[in-house]
Image (spheres, rainbow, N blue to C red):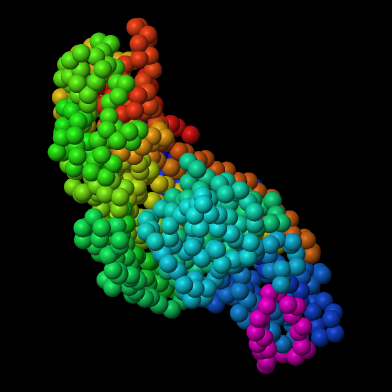
Amino acid sequence: MKQKTALRAAIWRCAAACIALVTMLAYMPALHAQVTATINGTVADQSGGIVPGAKVTAINEATKDKIETITSGAGTYTFPVLLPGSYTVQAEASGYQTSQQTGVVIHAGEQAKVPDFLLTVGSSVQTITVQSSTQILQTDSGQRGAVLDAKDIGNLALESRNVAELLKVLPGVTTAANGTGNGTQYSFLNIGVEGSPIGDGLNANGAPNRGGTANLVDGVDINDPGCNCWSIATINPDMTQEVSVLTSNFGADISHGPIVVNNISKSGGDTYHGSLYFYGRNDALNANDWVDNYNKVARGHAHYYYPGGNVGGVVPFTHKTLFFWFGYERMLQNTGNTYSLKSYIPTSDMLAGNFTATAANNALCNATGINSGNTGTYCNDLTGTKLPDGTVVGVSPNRPAGMIPSQFLDPGAAVLAKIWPAANVTPSAGNGYANYYQPIPGVHNGYIWRARVDYNLGSRNKIFVAYQYGNDTQLADGNGAHLYWSPTNSIPFPGGGLQGGETSKVLSGHFVHIFSDTLTNEAVGSIGYGNNPTSAPNIKAVYRTTLGYPTGAGYGTVFGTGDPWIPSYSSPANQGGSVQTFPDFSQQNIFTGSNYPLLKEAASAYDNVTKVLGSHTLKAGFFYEMVNNDQGNFNTPNGTLSFNGAPANNAITGVQVGSPNNPTANFVMGNATGYSESNANPKGDM
């Protein structure tokens, strides 16, 4: 563990050092433009004759930064590595008027051709012809894709604060139904600092749901490596300049795929700009839902509030060579009664072995009735139930119907039932005969901030560094009962619900060095990090010693694991049985101490060299990525019991012991139909 911690610290130190000293990469052989674009064109005179040696300048309209080149002998020029944005492209040559084309907008990964310059004979200082370029054609590549620019992101309606939601408006992007439902597997309503519908129901161009789409932000790979889906960072719309989606026919210099989503962050310009905002939704005018009304539960007040702001501009006293941008957003979310737990709590009489028509049992089974023959429920009679001494309930002498003698009650079962909550609602057909219903306030709060610095170190060196950090907390699966999913008959996790936390970090550095008019190098280093442990506030609440679980023969673990937890046990409702039995505590001890570990990292570097030879452009480069996924396994060193259906014959006596139709009776006798146990629970390291 110490070695791995030291390794991670070393990775982060190396990443930061590489970004700070990224100029060293300028002299390596090289690769791609995940975050940049290429424009090219031709300079000619009014007769169509080429103009070699013309000076062509690309001017970033936001920062006024300039990059210059010279047309080749064929009159062509190329700017191979430009950051996405709007540019003015200017051509000038001796004996000709200077000509400009403004509003040349390029997007990440794009190879665009600017309409030809047709220079007019005259003095370059006398007349400047300004042309507005309304359409840029991609003629050098069969690459296909689509773009959401800043205008799209600002104008299209969003349900959430995750820009990936907007991908569904692009051509070729579809939403996969969640089973027989109509929606995706991803909810746009309740967001965190991690998450994306990519790989969770949102697919592009027919690519596989998981693993078919790469998700990048400023060159950082943010796909969750545990599932090749989701994401280890949320892309906030007010922090995003554009999203480009490359769907097919792109070149080998694109290192990911087969579908690539490029998210480009906002950057500062040569003037100061900023905003303060507040996005909010509140259900104050909503009526209470039917289920809560029926169970006489007050309506939970749901709200989704997102205050935030951003500012960008030029850093003073840097002669407009250093630009900054910073954005922050707070997430204040409460889903009201969206999450709830419903279960079935046996009566104290049943736990004492009395399944007859007592007042408590009748109240619980008022709709179906004790001894109704409702197979598989705690309301069923004990017909055919064999006790450990071979006698049969209701048949053998001194074995009254519906009664389990106290000497056959399992003291371990009595301890396992200690964690059950008290019944709190009246069972009826309207609530599925449940006697426990608990709405769980879905509080999910957190924050995200993102910063970017662009530095134009002369006309031949361009650097930017971007960093995003986010943190949030919420109950696991919204209700804290179980990790990742909520089994039927779930109850609150003892000692307080399981608490999930997310910490997200993404860091990228980009450096461009222009050796000459025809030779350019681009280097990028990045690292993505997601740490998502799940913790139990009071893990000792499920310890054997805390609850007084027996320590005698038959109550230890098979492998002698020394696990401190009581055995897990699943409700028969999750094994194909009736729901009217007893609560589920199938959460196995997958925790290290009090935490379930879940850590994801993706560090990468790539470098491109681009050489322009006449009308040809050559690229060479490399790409390297190391992905790390440390995650707890789902083994059961504490052991897990099942109580469903008729118990098997005793392996020693050959006699079937237990109730064939009442799992709750088997529970109170400690007569399990199955048991499994792992001898260890090593942490997964991928």
The reply to whether residue 637 is visible in this rendering is no
Assign the N terminus to one quadrant of the image.
top left
Task: Provide residue 440's location: percent of width, then percent of height.
Answer: 26, 52
- Image point 40% across, 33% down: which residue? 575
User: Which region is colored magenta?
Assistant: 114-136
Image point 51% across, 52% down: which residue?
Answer: 180
Which is more toward the observer, 534 or 685?
A: 534
In terms of depth relative to the viewer, which is nearer, 104 or 581?
Answer: 581
Farthest bottom residue in view: 126
Of residues 35 and 410, the one drawn nearer to the viewer in this rendering: 410
257 left or right, relative to 155? right
Do we see residue 653 in this rendering? Answer: yes
Count the labels in the image. Answer: 0
Question: In this image, 667 relative to 86: left or right?
Answer: left
Q: Is residue 357 magenta?
A: no
Q: Main secondary structure of the magenta part?
A: loop
- Residue depicted at 84% across the width and 81% down the height: 48
* Percent coordinates x, y for residue 499 in the rendering: 28, 45
